[in-house]
Amino acid sequence: MKKIEAIIQPEKLDAVKEELFKADIHKMTVGPVKGCGQQKGYTESYRGTIFQVNLLPKIKVEIAVNDEFAQATVDAIIRGARTGEIGDGKIFVTDLSECIRIRTGEKGKKAIG
Amino acid sequence: MKKIEAIIQPEKLDAVKEELFKADIHKMTVGPVKGCGQQKGYTESYRGTIFQVNLLPKIKVEIAVNDEFAQATVDAIIRGARTGEIGDGKIFVTDLSECIRIRTGEKGKKAIG
Amino acid sequence: MKKIEAIIQPEKLDAVKEELFKADIHKMTVGPVKGCGQQKGYTESYRGTIFQVNLLPKIKVEIAVNDEFAQATVDAIIRGARTGEIGDGKIFVTDLSECIRIRTGEKGKKAIG
Amino acid sequence: MEVTFNQLFNSSNVLFLLLGAMYVFSMHAGLAFLEVGSVRKKSQVNALVKILTDWGFTTLVYFIIGYPIAYGISFLVPASELLGDNQGFDLVHFFFLLTFAACIPAIISGGIAERAKYWPQIIAGAIFAGIVYPFFESLVWGQNPLLGQAGSWLTTITGGIPFHYYAGSVVVHSVGGWIALPAVIILGPRLKRYVNGASNAIKVSNIPFLALGSWLLCVGWFGFNVMSAQDIAGISGLVALNSLMAMVGGIIAALIVSGNDVTFIHNGALAGLIAVCSGSDVMHPLGALVVGGVAAVIFVKLFHIETEVLKIDDVLGVWPLHGVAGTWGGIACGIFGSKALGGLGGVSFLAQAVGSVAALVLAFVCGFVVYKVLDVTVGIRLSEHDEIMGPDLSIHKIEAYPEEAL
Amino acid sequence: MEVTFNQLFNSSNVLFLLLGAMYVFSMHAGLAFLEVGSVRKKSQVNALVKILTDWGFTTLVYFIIGYPIAYGISFLVPASELLGDNQGFDLVHFFFLLTFAACIPAIISGGIAERAKYWPQIIAGAIFAGIVYPFFESLVWGQNPLLGQAGSWLTTITGGIPFHYYAGSVVVHSVGGWIALPAVIILGPRLKRYVNGASNAIKVSNIPFLALGSWLLCVGWFGFNVMSAQDIAGISGLVALNSLMAMVGGIIAALIVSGNDVTFIHNGALAGLIAVCSGSDVMHPLGALVVGGVAAVIFVKLFHIETEVLKIDDVLGVWPLHGVAGTWGGIACGIFGSKALGGLGGVSFLAQAVGSVAALVLAFVCGFVVYKVLDVTVGIRLSEHDEIMGPDLSIHKIEAYPEEAL
Amino acid sequence: MEVTFNQLFNSSNVLFLLLGAMYVFSMHAGLAFLEVGSVRKKSQVNALVKILTDWGFTTLVYFIIGYPIAYGISFLVPASELLGDNQGFDLVHFFFLLTFAACIPAIISGGIAERAKYWPQIIAGAIFAGIVYPFFESLVWGQNPLLGQAGSWLTTITGGIPFHYYAGSVVVHSVGGWIALPAVIILGPRLKRYVNGASNAIKVSNIPFLALGSWLLCVGWFGFNVMSAQDIAGISGLVALNSLMAMVGGIIAALIVSGNDVTFIHNGALAGLIAVCSGSDVMHPLGALVVGGVAAVIFVKLFHIETEVLKIDDVLGVWPLHGVAGTWGGIACGIFGSKALGGLGGVSFLAQAVGSVAALVLAFVCGFVVYKVLDVTVGIRLSEHDEIMGPDLSIHKIEAYPEEAL
Ligand SMILES: Nc1ncnc2c1ncn2[C@@H]1O[C@H](COP(=O)(O)OP(=O)(O)O)[C@@H](O)[C@H]1O
Ligand SMILES: Nc1ncnc2c1ncn2[C@@H]1O[C@H](COP(=O)(O)OP(=O)(O)O)[C@@H](O)[C@H]1O
Ligand SMILES: Nc1ncnc2c1ncn2[C@@H]1O[C@H](COP(=O)(O)OP(=O)(O)O)[C@@H](O)[C@H]1O
């Protein structure tokens, strides 16, 4: 099993969700984060003092899938999130050693979907 | 070492914490997320336009433990979070290759607790 | 590739960022979490009822790096975050099996930086 | 244009009562924000809608049914007759009295927050503001001389002294608070508020909004009390000063008794203001200070007993705040209004006690009957599912901060 | 000091209009918070700055250019002459009328929110408040007797009855709303508001702030309407009651038509108040109830058509709210003000229709010309990058909640 | 009831001052929200509690000690005597003057925010509002004719012209601001505000609340200034217009000088209003515009110097805002009040300079002494641990948004 973590632009969340649903991936966990990367930040000024802000708002999407779905998931995310501009984000994949459905206690492949 | 990540219903956080404390697990990191899974979302309407909201508020609990505690941790979370209804959530387990306590620089098993 | 996750004191974020930049690490994802560990919580009281609050505000910093940068990253975080007092936090390291840059589709080592 | 003295007097009078009405109207915004801040995020929209729409329905029923019940005056005549020869003073008079009537559902709203159905509460509010309250009003201020009018029935047993009221400690606040008590009991506590007999306090969402509500109320209250003269020639600086002193007594007493608790301090000011209404025109400022301070202590202590010992989930504490502090205010007027305590005199402890108790009994009984009937017929409580979702989503299909929903 | 009747009358008059001015000034805070709550978080600061600084610039241009245009009075004389012998009544009169003029840019602000450049909008606002609005004002209330004055041109075709206005349904609200329409059209919708022809509604950020704005407006509106007598001796309780009833009509109609939608309910109250202004002194309260209710229905339905069918991204719905409900109010005065419907009479349907349509045509044309010229010269829209960042960061270099930025 | 002219005059007078008192009371809500928005989230509750409880304690000390010091009047007589034969005018007069006195601790509060202990500040506030301020008041308005009274000592050196004040630029604002300066210095900057000699600005939490505070202040200020006539027969439309123009001058100057900074713009309006108080009854509106504009520039520039160069961590900038702009206002009255500049004349530059400087010296010295004594005895600063936790949790045991705590 794999855990796929994508950091995307906030305004792309809807498109990513749509692509995932089309690819029959319906389960995910989403949260707001801030990130810095190649995209440069901005300056704020408050009462005459200038601040360098380099963390920009991003959305993190986490999806646990069985190995055979990993590629399809990554592809769907890319389809939804890519604009071709700096700041589009990254996808990180890690191995998942176990997955348990709290409601039933089911484990592994059966629990993930 | 294992990293255990549980996605639970927000109102179950207190019960989960209690079960964890009972099982002598006192360290954790918690954050708000939104999730979608089998539990269906709801519709919002704003000024006559209807929105489909399918991400529901959830809480993510992350706990790093030594291998021998992993099962007890999972069990405690299930005891606290299970209602038997859709939306109870999932537990994901990954391998942790290193853990460092910032304060002392201790590593591995000693650092985790 | 490694994924490094650090839980630090909120007021240390600036110092950690600075140390990371000095160590030439410019990419990261940051989010607010709450944590409990050795640091004890506090009590709130609202309309005469006392609450035990044991989750304190923390910041989670996530950085994906190539293996050869892992140690430098951990060291930079420690330099920025350590005060020597309880509550300084933890660093968790996991193996990353893949990393993809959404913008270009690049993978692995080339995508991470 | 030559302006006569009479014209200026009538004009000033219209302005005077209009300002009073506007201030008390703005207090409804205060009640709305007090509730917004004191409930969970998932019930904030509901708080706002309840207060504003209750206002709307109250206006209608009080216009058509209530005001005629209380004063025997109907507005279903041509506009030219309505205006009269005093520039429409009667119309602003109606507006001013309406702002009092509309407090009844707005007070109850805070007690039953987060779990009541919308329409049954609108119906209940309309019954109270359209019938129950005007009926009691008629006994005290209106066309049925039972308690408050010179020569009313009560004066026959108190040596000629009627029930003294100035503004609404008893007529408005205690009636509202004592109606709310049975409502809260019949409705039952919010889910998980008490778990296996143990109290599990639910945290409020937003202290700044709660404080904003309290400020709007505190400022507007000077209109509530001073304009209760209902005639500019009857204005009294003493009423203003006593309101101030009672509010301050409430602030300081709450601060001390609660150990610097921000919610109690902001509600303590209100407790003081509620208690002072009745006797604000006859007490000495130092008497008002004491009355207000005692009211705040009553509120802080009784709220604890109500919600922790008796396990009645009165979300904003409207029974101890409006109900009991209001009753205390009615009675306190009979004590601190006396000449012996520096007051202006002319009040009777017996009359105050009888009037205050009559109000609470009437309110409690009517509240109980109305909510019981609604409960067994249409039901007054949200389904468990809707309550967990929160009234904002289940009733109004929106969250308080929609942009945050993903 | 011996005070004469005249002194008291003049003093009361100054106080009266000052209170009116203060209430309408506080309504600008209401407009600010209505916008803060109705835009995304990244545009809240911009909303606040626009309203406050528009107020500043409007004061200057109206003082120097606008007021002389409307009334032929200049203030560039020594202070002693300004004071006159009525304790400076003319000066508070200016203040009161200014608070109306300043509504024009504040109304437009809500339609063009989140994507307009700052300075071009300031210039446009100054042109409207300094020239266009005062010119129309002069035709209705001022020195050029075309529509509203006794004996004005219009009376020659309506059998002697001029265009009736009391407060500003037409002169202020419909002018503001109809200027905003071309502005919103020329500016174009916010990015991603309509995607491939499909509507993609953008969620508001903060319902409590939106509601706070609505409350500030509702309370202040009684000043807006009642103090429009502009002379304390002309105060009318009927104006207050009609304002109340129209507001209530708007609340209840919006509640029903929108299915308990919190944003529509809070805006419905405003629709009612906008529509009642013109005829508030001549209608029967039940007439006002209907006028307000119809205004809210117009708003709810037309907002949907405007933003969903016509795909005009009018963020706060200022065209249906201020523009169309204002026009409806002007015309409704000619219907419900008649004796047949319980009103005081003395109004002409024809005069109302002509005056109301004249206002909307003038406003639309001037709005179109000014924004078109600005658009092709300096440009009125933020760059795409700046709009994505949000006006708060790109114009004001700060977020609404700076502590949250990391 | 037959109403006489005298009755109507007295009643109007009571209403007039009551409205003034209510407006200035509502300005305290403004000060509270200005502070709530300008501090970090962890200090918002503390801001709210400080302002409300300071109000409470100030009322008590000013009632018992301060007012007798300033005016030699005691309230410890029966209520009937208090009422007098003018419907309790003296009592609302007290209320009105109290609202000024209570500004002193509320102004200081904004400077020392986020790190001061609670009770020592309450004690300090009580000393200022109970003794220092009333003493200075007595010299200007009260029973000790030194500066402001006709025939006071100052007139002997200024050719008969006393220190001119209308509302409180000097007596209230500059005294408050100049007391705050030593308080802020003795207290020291917030932790990590300056790191190794480098400034490390701490971000504010909530711009909408800051703006709400500013709006409450701006609206109420017209009460502050106009009702300072203290007698309805003395009302002046010029005071209202000058207040408006100075506010606008402040808004526009701050906009330009600060580069469209939302916090400066909202504080600039206040700077203008602070500066205009003293001479609002004698200046020409264009003079007021300039005075307000200059005040805003002073504030913007001096705040920068204070916090960045001098490294004084004055959180809300109360010294440049209330202190220096207040002093500027006192002096400006001597310039722009002159006939040569279109004013009404009758003011002396020398008198204004002496009075303004006297105020700042007195305030600075008293502030220094009181805070130094408190610092070395009970200590005025929170422990480092408590400051890091934030005053909300360490003093009040609650967060501003409790529901968010897990
Ligand atoms: N190595 C990394 N570790 C953690 N987060 C990263 C890393 N690289 C990128 N990110 C996240 O992805 C976001 C987008 O990265 P950026 O470099 O701006 O995009 P792009 O790769 O499209 O140029 C960043 O803001 C950050 O949140
Ligand atoms: N495969 C998954 N990947 C990521 N998050 C998941 C996955 N499955 C479930 N979740 C998270 O768990 C929550 C509960 O899932 P749901 O399917 O509704 O519960 P249940 O398994 O009890 O029916 C979801 O809202 C989502 O946040
Ligand atoms: N085993 C763990 N699992 C998950 N999070 C942890 C764990 N240990 C510590 N943390 C996180 O690190 C934070 C700091 O831990 P704490 O024990 O207080 O610090 P220290 O190790 O410096 O004494 C905690 O609040 C929690 O968020």
Image (cartoon, coloured by chain):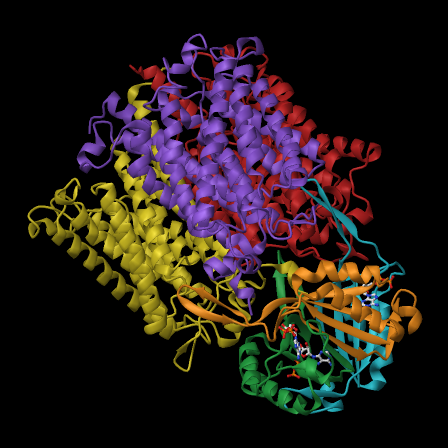
Chain colours: A cyan, B green, C orange, D yellow, E red, F purple
Image quarter (top left, top right, bottom left or bottom right) of the C terminus of chain A: bottom right
Q: Nearer the viewer, residue D111 or E139?
A: D111
Indicate the quadrant containing the N terminus of chain A: top left, top right, bottom left or bottom right: bottom right
Q: Nearer the viewer, residue D115 or B91?
A: B91
Q: Please provide percent x and percent y for residue F380.
A: 48, 49
Q: Residue D334: tell me if it is visible.
A: yes
Vertical placement of residue F2 versus E38, above or below? above
Residue B38 can be seen in this image: no
C44 displayed left or right of E140: left
Figure quadrant of residue F211: top right
The residue depicted at 49 percent of the width and 61 percent of the height is F398
Frontmost residue, E275 versus D40: D40
- Is residue D183 placed above or below D18 in the rendered structure? below
Above or below, E247 against C11 in this view is above
Q: Quadrant of ligand 1?
A: bottom right
**Where does the image place residue B9, in percent across and percent down from the top left?**
60, 77
x then y, percent, for residue E350: 56, 30
Where does residue E363 sit, x and y in percent of width and height? Answer: 67, 32
Q: Residue B107 appears in which quarter of the rendering?
A: bottom right
Q: Residue at x 80, y 74 (%)?
A: C3
Q: Is residue B72 left or right of residue F221?
A: right
Vertical relation: E72 (above or below) B43: above
